[in-house]
Image (cartoon, rainbow, N blue to C red):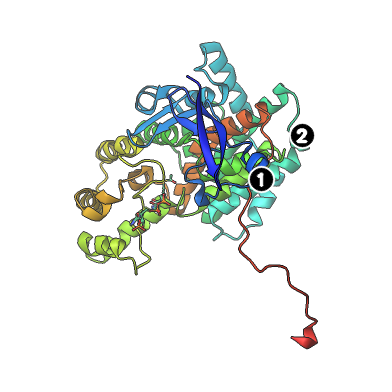
Amino acid sequence: MVKSAQITIDGKTFEFPVVEGTEHELAIDIGKLRAQTGVITLDPGFKNTGSTSSAITFLNGEEGILRYRGYSIEDLAEKSTFLEVAYLLIYGELPSKSEFDKFKEDIKYHTLVHEDIKTILTGFPSNAHPMGVLSSLVTSLTAFYPESLDPNRSREGVDLSIARIIAKLPTFAAWSYKNQKGQPVVYPRNELEYVPNFLRMMFALPTEDYEVNPVVARALDQLLILHADHEQNCSTSTVRIVGSSQASLFASISAGINALWGPLHGGANQAVIEMLENIRKDGGDTKKWMDKAKDKNDPFRLMGFGHRVYKNFDPRARILKKAADDVLESLGVVDPVLDIAKGLEEVALSDEYFIERKLYPNVDFYSGIIYRALGIPVDMFTVMFALGRLPGWIAQWKEMRESGEPIGRPRQVYIGHPARDYTPIDKR
Ligand code: ACO
């Protein structure tokens, strides 16, 4: 059915097409709005603005649905692996066995990084936040692979950059942690699978043998799947907008890492565990902290709660709440903050303030508790999120390039001074 929308400005009516997605989402196409009417739309935070059409991830916040390329997140988290999900997101379909073997082989082959990268790494003070180190090392890849700067290179060339960044990000992540600890870096071992290889680079020491615990490896693999894409969020939109200037894949991903870092986005997982620890040290009075979260004169927010899009439940949080119980039990870990988290959730779900505003636990509420049980230090939590989100960023960058999207350049409503004359400094 052809649909259209009318906009009336000062008594004059203009008609615009309405586009419909495969899940029947409707959007008014205002591409010609300014040309026809002379006005623009104003939407701070892009709360109502679709920046693109995308075939990668479907999300319905009212019903708590998340699908990658049509497959439900629940199915993928239970039955798939992170690298298979990465292939699915980037190339659009689940791989055949031979396609998947080649993809994994390409990634294994590129896990090693140039020795000079170690010089860059050791130049960082040991207290550097690993997210800053990670984004810098990703940017440094543009210097080691200058041919990657051309975004219009062949398909094989783009695939090579994709394999390189997927292969090297775990090495960078683990090395940024080693640098912080003052320990020697551990080189990748290509006989290991993706996640076990990462865990070994993180935790192995030259003084003792290191065996990867399969429970830890599976739990981390599942966490990475749950974070792999989330359509046009802050970091993904950043990747697309940076890439739209024809900046390279590595430069665009580095920008995405920085966008993810903030506590209102990927940095929330670190903020949640710090908040839970503070509540524990303060005596565990959840009501007191709930009251702080509701007090408009108090800047405190319940971290890990609320979401721009999910207004019913976050399906990833549901999976993780159960995973937190399972993982802690299999590893024999007792973490008092898990009970505090569950207590907070229970109070929040029956509190008018949270019900009215449709605030529910998001993916970050339970993920930190699992990371901690796996032995991942708190300031590496957001790095874990970046490892997981990488395939999504790549897929979105690739889709944006292949569909020939124009450079991203929003407009504004200017509210500053009207034109005025310059006054020399001695006359002011
Ligand atoms: N605690 C207390 N109140 C909250 C919270 C919270 N965590 N989140 C939202 N609210 C309140 C706001 O104060 C506002 O109240 P008001 O209408 O009385 O002014 C209302 O709920 C709507 O909140 P907004 O900030 O307008 O919602 P927005 O969509 O802009 O923000 C966000 C979403 C950033 C996720 C927000 O809920 C938040 O700050 N949560 C905590 C941080 C967090 O967990 N971030 C991770 C998000 S998931 C991710 O990025 C992977």
> Where is the C terminus found, in terms of image quarters?
bottom right
**Image position, residue 79 (x, y; %):** 37, 22
Identity, as a three-letter code, of the amino acid under mark 2: Asp
Instruction: For label 2, count other residues whose C-alpha is less than 10 Å away and answer few (under 14), some (14-19) or many (20+).
Output: some
Asked whether residue 187 appears in the rendered view, the answer is: no
Q: Is mark 1 within 8 Å of ligand 1?
A: no
Q: Is residue 401 above or below residue 12?
A: above
Task: Name the residue nearer the viewer: 353 or 340.
Answer: 353
Query: Residue visible at 44% across and 48% down?
Result: 381
Q: Which residue is mark 2?
A: 150
Asked whether residue 304 appears in the rendered view, the answer is: yes
Callouts 2 and 1 close, C-beta under 8 Å: no
Q: Earlier in the sequence, mark 2 or mark 1?
A: 2
The secondary element bearing badge 1 is classed as loop
Left or right side of 250 for 379? left
Task: Name the residue nearer the viewer: 349 or 278.
Answer: 349
Disc assigned to residue 409: 1
Circle nearer the viewer, 2 or 1 = 1
Identity, as a three-letter code, of the amino acid under mark 1: Arg
